[in-house]
Image (cartoon, rainbow, N blue to C red):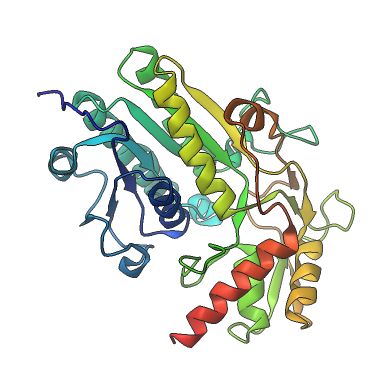
Amino acid sequence: MRTLIRKNPKPSVLVTGGAGYIGSHAVLALKDSGWPVAVLDNLSAGFRSAVADDVPFYNGNVGDKDLLLRIFEEQMIGAIMHFAGSVVVPHSVANPLAYYHNNTVNAHILIETAARAGIPHFIFSSTAAVYGSPLVDRVSEETPCAPINPYGWSKLMTEQMLKDVSFAGEMNHCALRYFNVAGADPDGRAGQSTVGATHLIKVAIEAALGKRDSVAIFGTDYDTSDGSGVRDYIHVTDLAVAHVLALEALIEQPEQSLTMNCGYGRGFSVLEVLDAVDRVTNNKLVRIADDRRAGDPATLIADPTKIRETLNWRPQFDNLETIVRHALRWERKLCENC
């Protein structure tokens, strides 16, 4: 197989899952920074309308080698941002093999095909779920990985594949371990449109706007300040910018690979998040206590020191109510289009 030759100082970036929630924001961040972009998405969870008409779009699966090779050649791809995958923790517990196939087997095909085509840089959408239920208040990249659900294991397996491929000199990579992603593009260009979403802030705002009758609180007996689970919420636009900075770092130092947490380093309980939604929407949500969900840890908060120091990443939207306001604005826009 021939190696593709790229001369553009900003090579084209293939964004898998680029019609989905986080992927579509990454496309915006790349375009805003002047990067040529192409999107591959099978639209199982994404929306064609989330991708601008001037972005080359391919409807297909990341496990399709022939399609991947065609995209690599047609678009002269020089880097990949891989977002395509399954993301709901309880679903992974109920149907683990589907998660290992979509998140790990398909990732293997994508990585192998990219390496053989000579694509030198790979950004991977990983997760804080690789840490499981850590015994520390803040999780650093040195915290032992011990997933407690198939979702976390499927992502950790892909991280290991990338480490081994990078060690073999095939490409360099960056695995970004997300904490809880929320919010929407501040300019209203993108947001979370998922039907039947399970993300807390999305669910709460839908309830505030009458799309749901109530909000379930999965677990009220955790060892936390108010008994509900505690998470580190990161604005999706700050996360998207981190991907662009990570790509720049890989290109500047092609012999380095990186693994970094993406969070703000501060946790909010489920009840605190619902209180924030009440304040922003001037509405009182109906709250229903429910059992814990399988695979959910009590607390998960990032130590973001490494990403701040390595990428000089400076979040612009590190405020819970700002995240809620942007998500609310997007949800109201969706209602206008109903």
**In the picture provided, is 137 more to the left or to the right than 258?**
right
Q: Tell me where residue 285 sits by quadrant.
A: bottom right
Residue 126 shows in the view = no
Residue closest to the far right: 225
**In the picture provided, is 126 more to the left or to the right than 206?**
left
Q: Tell me where residue 19 sits by quadrant.
A: bottom left
- Vertical placement of residue 188 versus 125, above or below: below
Q: Which of 13 and 148 is in front in this view?
A: 13
Q: Tell me where residue 47 sits by quadrant.
A: bottom left
Quarter of the picture containing the N terminus is top left
- Vertical placement of residue 145 versus 212, above or below: above
Q: Where is residue 281 in the image (x, y as percent from the top left)?
A: 73, 79
Quarter of the picture containing the C terminus is bottom left
Residue 259 shows in the view = yes
- Vertical placement of residue 159 versus 23, above or below: above
Residue at 52% x, 50% y: name it: 93
Q: Which of 268 and 256 is in front in this view?
A: 256
Give the number of marks.
0
**In the picture provided, is 89 more to the left or to the right than 60?**
right
Q: Position of residue 36 (x, y in %)?
A: 30, 45
Q: Nearer the viewer, residue 159 or 334?
A: 334
Residue at 62% x, 45% y: name it: 179
Q: Position of residue 95 (x, y in %)?
A: 44, 53
Residue at 52% x, 45% y: name it: 241
Q: Position of residue 158 (x, y in %)?
A: 42, 32
Q: Which of 151 and 28 is in front in this view?
A: 28
Residue at 25% x, 25% y: name it: 115
